[in-house]
């Protein structure tokens, strides 16, 4: 039977993440019926496919939410990770997978498709071991699990690619740990999506583990040299030293690249193993390779760079937040909850059109900067990275347009009314919760702009923090709103 002629409903978990967001779009293009499970539907409101899917709002850690999301599902895609939840992330991942499998069995799901990591080396990292254990937990019930194990994903916006390109761009001479000479089996994001899509179109469920990789096996050093050549850079000088442990390497990567230390740690941990597909676990008999062949590394990198240059990156590694991320808990905190509320409010009325003002506001951050005092913003980002935060280097997905739920330097877009209102939630390390909000209105032929910073301090430390930086606010915030108007007037 042709699966497209059979009424199937597909569930995608992790739809707000890097792979999940692209998979949803791919399935919709195949005219398939898709439901997504997300903690907050606002998070995907800006996605072009948001109106084309069923939305099940809830948590994968809540059985009632799982039961609701899995009802009527034929194939469920499991794309959830918990690697940023501390030292016990592997236990958390195992329990989440086990609960999901049991809920899927109770709901009568026919197939689970899981994207994991290649784990054939005896010297396996905790991250890769957890990925393999997750697959085993998912397969612990009667529901067939098709586990696709991949290596480094090459694509615009992937954490692995961002780490690779920024290391190569910024360090013409680098001292590196021994793992840069370990073999890896990279795969293009387009090929990941090809296999995930075709898993949906199989005539019958499959319960098996497959390794998927691109056409080349390379060392990490090889990939850096390939990237340098494609980018028109000189060949990188790589000096291997034995003292850089994965922990030290992740700290170094956190300083040099946009990828924060917390995320770099599992990525580096994976590189201490040889991540090469096992021919005995080939997927070719189940899903043949694409007719045009798998994408080689140079082509994958070129495609990724072209997407970045054209500002058409569809999803980024920073789109996803962990289940305990502050953004997930921030929305709708009531002022009557008993917390002190500290504010810095600025208002300006100008004859510059609201459209011109909004264009500047929506373009804030990233390569456009923060309208003055950029050194202070940079210093705050550096401090944030030093205490384990994300810092400013995440940048933006697009330099001019925003969507709800995406990251913007060390902020996240919490609310967005195009042309009128932008509300950002601070994901920097703070003794409290902070927002930055802009509102634009037209009144009697004039444009009224309101810029408001709001801070909910946590205890005495939060109060002291706000008052300690208040002198900087007296410089930063007036400068920001003044320069927004100034730049809009200049563009007009």
Image: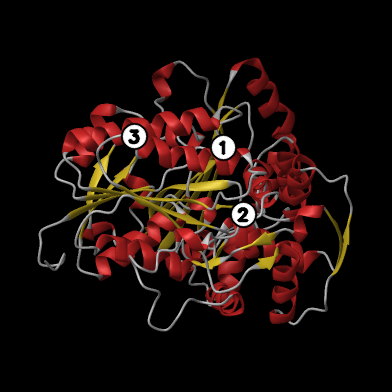
* Residue drawn at point x = 68 percent, y = 40 percent: 473
Q: Is residue 323 visible to us here?
A: yes
**Residue pointed to by mark 2:** 394
Query: 136 left or right of 375?
Result: left
Q: Nearer the viewer, mark 1 or mark 2?
A: 1
| Disc sitting over residue 102 in the figure | none
Residue 140 image label: 3
- Earlier sequence position, callout 3 versus callout 2: 3
Q: Earlier in the sequence, mark 3 or mark 1?
A: 1
Local SS, label 1: loop
* Horizontal relation, residue 3 to residue 468: left or right: left
Image quarter of residue 215: bottom right
Q: Residue 164's x, y, as percent?
A: 68, 63
Q: Position of residue 438 (x, y in %)?
A: 48, 50
- Could you tell me how far apart the alpha carbons at marks 3 and 2 are, in whole angstroms? 38 Å
Separation (CA) of disc 3 from disc 1: 25 Å
Q: Residues within 10 Å of mark 1 (few under 14, many from 20)?
A: some
Label number found at residue 84: 1
N-terminal of the pair, mark 1 or mark 2, is: 1
């Amino acid at each position: 039977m042709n699966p497209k002629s059979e009424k199937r409903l597909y569930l995608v978990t992790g739809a707000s993440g890097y792979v999940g967001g692209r998979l949803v779009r791919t399935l919709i293009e195949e005219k398939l019926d898709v439901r997504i499970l997300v903690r907050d539907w606002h998070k995907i409101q800006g996605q072009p496919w948001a109106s084309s899917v069923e939305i099940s709002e809830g948590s994968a850690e809540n059985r009632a939410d799982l039961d609701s999301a899995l009802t009527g599902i034929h194939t469920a895609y499991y794309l959830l990770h918990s690697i940023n939840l501390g030292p016990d992330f592997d236990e958390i991942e195992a329990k989440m997978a086990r609960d999901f499998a049991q809920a899927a069995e109770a709901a009568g799901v026919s197939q689970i498709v899981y994207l994991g990591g290649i784990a054939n080396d005896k010297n396996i990292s905790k991250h890769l071991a957890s990925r393999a254990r997750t697959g085993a937990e998912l397969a612990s019930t009667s529901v067939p699990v098709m586990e696709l194990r991949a290596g480094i994903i090459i694509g615009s916006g992937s954490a692995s690619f961002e780490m690779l390109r920024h290391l190569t761009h910024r360090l013409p001479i680098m001292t590196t740990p021994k793992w840069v000479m370990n073999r890896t089996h990279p795969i293009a994001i387009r090929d990941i999506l090809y296999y995930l899509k075709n898993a949906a179109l199989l005539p019958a469920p499959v319960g098996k583990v497959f390794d998927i990789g691109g056409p080349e096996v390379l060392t990490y050093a090889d990939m850096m040299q390939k990237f340098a050549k494609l980018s028109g850079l000189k060949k990188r000088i790589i000096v291997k030293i034995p003292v850089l442990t994965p922990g030290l390497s992740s700290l170094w990567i956190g300083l040099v690249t946009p990828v924060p230390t917390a995320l770099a740690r599992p990525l580096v941990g994976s590189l201490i193993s040889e991540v090469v597909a096992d021919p005995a676990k080939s997927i070719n008999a189940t899903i043949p390779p694409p007719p045009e062949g798998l994408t080689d590394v140079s082509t994958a990198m070129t495609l990724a760079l072209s997407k970045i240059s054209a500002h058409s990156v569809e999803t980024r590694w920073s789109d996803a937040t962990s289940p305990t991320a502050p953004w997930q808990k921030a929305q709708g905190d009531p002022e009557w909850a008993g917390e002190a509320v500290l504010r810095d409010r600025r208002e300006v009325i100008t004859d510059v059109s609201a459209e011109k003002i909004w264009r500047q506001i929506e373009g804030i951050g990233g390569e456009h900067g923060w309208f003055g005092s950029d050194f202070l913003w940079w210093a705050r980002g550096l401090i944030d990275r030093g205490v384990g935060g994300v810092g400013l280097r995440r940048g933006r997905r697009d330099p001019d347009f925003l969507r709800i739920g995406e990251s913007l330097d060390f902020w996240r877009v919490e609310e967005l009314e195009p042309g009128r209102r932008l509300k950002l939630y601070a994901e920097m390390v703070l003794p409290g919760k902070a927002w930055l909000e802009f509102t634009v209105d037209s009144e009697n032929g004039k444009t009224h702009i309101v810029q408001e910073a709001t801070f909910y301090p946590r205890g005495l430390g939060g109060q002291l923090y706000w008052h300690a930086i208040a002198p900087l606010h007296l410089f930063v915030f007036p400068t920001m709103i003044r320069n927004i108007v100034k730049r809009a007037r200049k563009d007009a």
